[in-house]
Image (cartoon, rainbow, N blue to C red):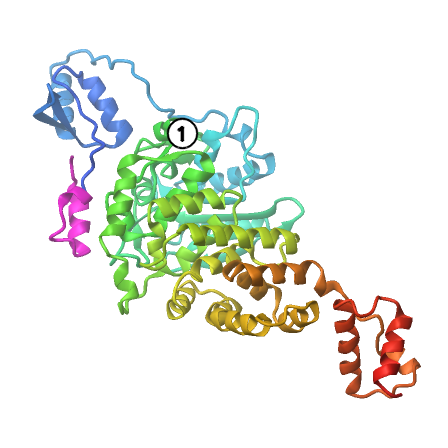
Amino acid sequence: GIISRRDLDIALHHGFNHAPVKGYMSRNLKTITPDTSIGEIESIMVTYDVGRLPVIRDNNLVGIVTRTDILRQRHADWDLGSPQQKIPQRKKPKSFLTKPQHLIPDLTWKLLTKLATSAEARGWNLYLVGGAVRDLLLTQEGEKVELQDIDLVVDGFHNSADVSAGVELGKALQAKYPQARLEVHGEFQTAALLWHNDPIFGNLAIDIATARTEFYPYPAANPEVEASSIRQDLYRRDFSINALALRLNESRQGELLDFFGGVLDLESRQVRVLHANSFIEDPTRIYRAVRFAVRLGFTIEPQTEEYIRYALDSGVYDSFFQGNERKAPALQSRLKTELKYILQADYWQSALQLLSRLTALRCLHPDLKLDSQLWWQIRLVDRFLRRFDPEHSLSHWQMRLEVLLSYLAVADRDRVAKNLQLSTDSITRLNTLNQVAEEVKARLEKDISPSQVVKCLRQYQLPMLLLLAATTCQQIRRLIWSYLTTWAEVKSPLDGNDLKAMGYQPSPLYKEMLDSLLSARLDGVISDNPEAAKDMLKKYYKS
């Protein structure tokens, strides 16, 4: 394998002084032979952003070539006045996206062009970065990509772009589109332009930031950032397929910046992380790797999977569940966001299974495992949700998450739910689930008549009933199903107006009388015939 000085420095900074190097080195090496041409070496270095290439002969290391060696050789060739060496033709990744306007809706492209013109007038380059570039490259010919979340990065070419550059461009664009709301986020002054239910753009969000680099003071923290170059901005990102930038300026428009082999990874359909310490510093990247792999139909590159497993096995996250008082946004609000993306997507089952295979649920709690029973319970609550909440009035992703957390002891559920900043209702359900289950079981242990079931269950709202149904015994689950499908819809044959017409004076007795009628109707003692209900009241209640 090979390890960089940067990865060593980061590992040492996070306290892994005594850890074996195997967890941080890369086995996915780019190597050359003694016969590899200089042109080929240059091409490999540029494509994969490699500064050193081991020279291998008969499976033995016989030397190393550095970027400096290549520059020195080129300089010697130029000094000698020799003709420029012809670089052998090899398969090179795409370096230009011709006519990107054909892939983006016309109105959105017009908006981006105005922003790029404003940037260029100030001496700046403007780049479309991240997932939008990835999706453009994956788009089939003749299709257009509906971009709703657009990330842009400003970088200076003859004028420096400081932290306020994004805000300056955001204000300039809002002057042309006053219907957009401008927000400025964080110390680094990222500008966000937001359209909501707009007749032209619908729901559109554009983030504009100055090119920056970042540093994590400790694992799972929020990164600290400072202004830098577009290359460093791409270097701080998670995966090679997201570390792509598309130049929007009119000059060299469509130029594709790919310093880390992202285009080749797109062609290979794999998710490859950029840094050995990436998952140590930010566990949400594990969930992002899974989300991209499942959503795009990609595989997680083997070395990347090794880095994931090493980060999880290192125990670096366990300390946050053992009294570590440091704030860990990557295990709290940011992790919640990734969980929401996964659990509300159509592919949530495949993603959850992959997270389980990687043992990545340990990011939520060290004891959380997706065993066969828990996996069945989560799918069961999904069945109940589809049957009883087809309009999605409830947060289906959160109900799935609640079932997942119900696997833990009550005290651990409470802590994890609060770490993830779940709603008060959700935390209350998780904390009272065991108590409710015991109460329901005790009340229905001897009497499971429809009237008794209705009296017992009608005090609970639908989310609690669904959570209870997914986690309780078969008998209670069947009774909840019958209650929700049939018995909850049964009404008393008479109402208060009918009682008044029969000569009964309005009083608290009305509730008792109507409950008696409902119970009789549920248990089949009377039919829904109003006359039968009146006869029953006359028999037991005097007017």
Q: Nearer the viewer, residue 543 or 64?
A: 543
x and y, in percent, of residue 3 in the image: 16, 39
Q: Quadrant of the N terminus?
A: top left
Q: Amino acid at mark 1?
A: Glu
Read off the residue under disc 1: 255
x%, y% of residue 289?
37, 43
Secondary structure type for disc 1: loop
The stretch drawn in magenta includes residue 22: yes
Q: Residues within 10 Å of mark 1 (few under 14, many from 20)?
A: some
Report the residue at 45% width, 35% height from top.
296
Q: Quick check: 119 above or below 312?
A: above
Name the side, left or right, on which 230 lies relative to 464. left
378 relative to 48 in the view: left or right: right
Give the x, y percent position of residue 81.
14, 13
Part of the protein shown in magenta: 1-23
Quadrant the C terminus occupies: bottom right
